[in-house]
Image: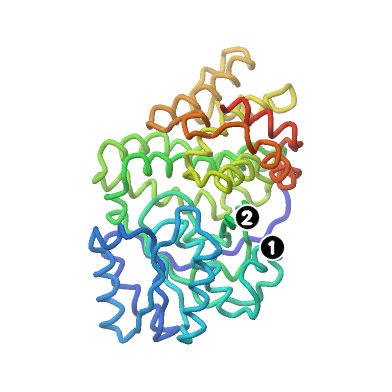
Amino acid sequence: MKNFYYHIPTEVFFGKGQIENLAPKIGDYSKKVLLVYGGGSIKRTGLYEKVIEKLVSHGIAVFELGGVEPNPRIDTVRRGVKLCKSHEIGAVLSVGGGSTTDCAKLVAAGALYDGDPWELVLDNGKIKEALPIFTVVTIAATGSEMDRLAVISNMDTNEKLAVFSPYFHPKVSILDPEYTYTVPKIQTAAGTADIMSHVIERYFNPYEGAYLQNRIGDGLLKTCIHFGPIACEEPNNYDARANLLWTSTLAIDGVTWRGNEVGSSAHPMEHELSAYYDITHGIGLAILIPHWMRYILSEQTKPRFVEYAVNVWGVDSALPDDEIAKAGIERTHAFFESLGIPMRLSDLDIDETHFDEMAEKAEKRTKFSYVPLSKEDVKSIFKAAL
């Protein structure tokens, strides 16, 4: 196991009614907050009114940045930064999913930066501080409520890039599973795939001494496999929503990949798909992951695939290793498909038009993955996924 540093400074309030803790915590930092949210679902569900009432009753002035895109765009971040600077806002609150929180994170950093916030995306080292960030989570997917990562898109340049900063850890996150009841079935499915992708990307690593991390990964993946379908069919099932929500948070906070860290493969490839076609992140990942698995399966990687198939999917360990490894991949594909996720890029009206440039960009970020991928490797996986 490699040496590592692990620090999660976020306070988490999990469960029913935990919204009561939000306003007092924000009030400790500022009496002005920027409320960041997406397409308006929080208004339809009544959560918007509840949050506003809690904040106002605590003497906190609320400014709003609505309309955050599913793949948050730098133009929206710029609007938020302008609001923070012009009104001297001292805190940022995300109410929504991971995209909303990602946007809020870069707004929080951009508000204290003199240049254009896209400069922070291109050079993470320029992030020296950020306004305090708070989140109220409404979907189990990215886990952005407890990590140091944001992903931002620039549609002018067809770029979707990850931004890392220790200043991005939210101060407080409210995780009430009841707020995820209204998530549509396809988004619940995509969120489940997204959660699993975070675990899978780290599960496949070359480090033999990190036994514990993969056993935790087994549990997180099996939780998704058990509760994902239940949440899709029974949206108001509290146990299903609660287990998925907490799994989402743990899947990306580092508990499964400190000491065995390896670069991602599927995520850089999917980011290119989203940058060019603006597709749902979890759906793109569900399509790519089985094809990536098939592509990297070899004599060298086969033992890890056998471990994955037996421990996660319960494949019979008495079978030949080749059969076990392939069975694990096929069960992964079949599970995503069973959730109602389209499993071909062509189903999303994606063709080969941009494969060359997408593969070239993805190659820059797959050099340190479990199996490093060249431009041609990435392009072959894209083609297989058509």
Q: Nearer the viewer, residue 260 or 98?
A: 98
Labels in figure, total? 2
Q: Which mark is residue 122?
A: 1
Amino acid identity at mark 1: Leu
Question: Looking at this view, is 63 or 2 the one in front?
Answer: 63
Q: At 49% from the left edge and 44% from the top edge, which residue is drawn?
A: 279
Q: Nearer the viewer, residue 76 or 161?
A: 76
Q: Pointers 1 and 2 in contact (CB under 8 A)? A: yes
Q: Residues within 10 Å of mark 2 (few under 14, many from 20)?
A: some
* Mark 1, other Cα within 10 Å: few <14 / some 14–19 / many ≥20: few
> What's the mark number on residue 62?
none
- What residue is drawn where x is 54% and y is 34%? 350
Structural distance between the alpha carbons of marks 1 and 2: 8 Å
Q: Position of residue 83 (x, y in %)?
A: 47, 79
Q: Position of residue 327 (x, y in %)?
A: 54, 19
Q: Is residue 286 above or below residue 97?
A: above
Above or below, comparing residue 273 to residue 123 in the picture:
above
Residue at 64 percent across and 52 percent down: it is 258
Question: Which color scheme is applied?
Answer: rainbow
Whichever of callouts 1 and 2 sits on the residue coming sooner in the sequence is 1
Q: Which residue is mark 2?
A: 161
Locate residue 244 relative to residue 379 in the image: left or right.
Answer: left
Res 6 → quadrant: bottom right
The image shows residue 345, relative to residue 161, as above or below, that is: above
Name the amino acid, label 2: Leu
Judging from the image, what secondary structure is the residue with disc 1 in?
helix
Classify the position of the C terminus by image quarter. top right
**Tag 2 secondary structure:** strand
Residue positioned 74% across, 26% down in the render: 300
Residue 102 location in percent, x, y?
51, 61
